[in-house]
């Protein structure tokens, strides 16, 4: 499942008390590497459908969410579970890297 997240809904989205992992994809339309990561995240979300939720966050439209997660480099993928950041992946991230982390 992929959800568009912004400053208006990110707190509600992240306060859920379910037992799912979240991949938060911080991106910008000006960032070529962000488009690469988006395609990888989309592929992984289809393969692991139901196991985790993907949240897409446009950094140009969501400065509060960006500040909350201290995002300073794009692209950035944040793995989030039970209200905690487990890891951040900066730059181009491979499908293997994401899958290896999720299979730990």
Image (tube, helix red, strand yellow):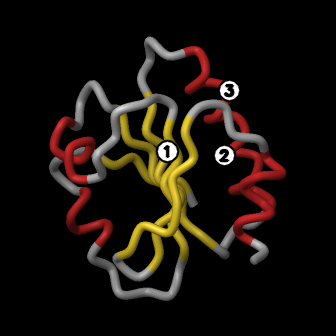
Q: Is residue 96 left or right of residue 85?
A: right
Q: Residues within 10 Å of mark 2 (few under 14, many from 20)?
A: many
Query: Mark 2 — residue?
Result: 41
At a point 41% along the width and 82% down the height, the residue shown is: 82
Between discs 2 and 1, the one toward the N terminus: 1
Taking depth in this image into account, of 9 and 98 the one nearest to the observer is 98
Between discs 1 and 3, the one toward the N terminus: 1
Quarter of the rendering containing residue 30: top left
Q: Position of residue 77 (x, y in %)?
A: 53, 47
SS at circle 1:
strand
Vertical comparison of 25 with 53: above or below: above
At a point 21% along the width and 64% down the height, the residue shown is: 11
Query: Mark 3 — residue?
Result: 36
Q: Position of residue 62 (x, y in %)?
A: 23, 37
Kindly report the distance in space between the C-alpha atoms of the residues bearing marks 2 and 1: 8 Å
At a point 22% along the width and 56% down the height, the residue shown is: 9
Callout 2 touching callout 1 (CB < 8 Å)? yes
Q: Tell me the quarter of the image containing the N terminus.
A: bottom right
Q: Residues within 10 Å of mark 3 (few under 14, many from 20)?
A: some
């Amino acid at each position: 499942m992929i959800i568009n997240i912004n400053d208006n809904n990110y707190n509600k989205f992240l306060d859920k008390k379910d037992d799912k992992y979240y991949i938060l994809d911080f991106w910008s339309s000006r960032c070529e590497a962000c488009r690469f990561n988006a395609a990888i995240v989309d592929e992984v979300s289809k393969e692991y459908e139901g196991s985790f939720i993907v949240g897409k966050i446009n950094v140009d439209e969501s400065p509060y969410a960006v500040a909350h997660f201290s995002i300073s480099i794009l692209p950035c993928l944040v793995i989030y579970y039970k209200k905690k950041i487990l890891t951040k992946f900066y730059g181009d991230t491979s499908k293997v890297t994401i899958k290896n982390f999720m299979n730990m």
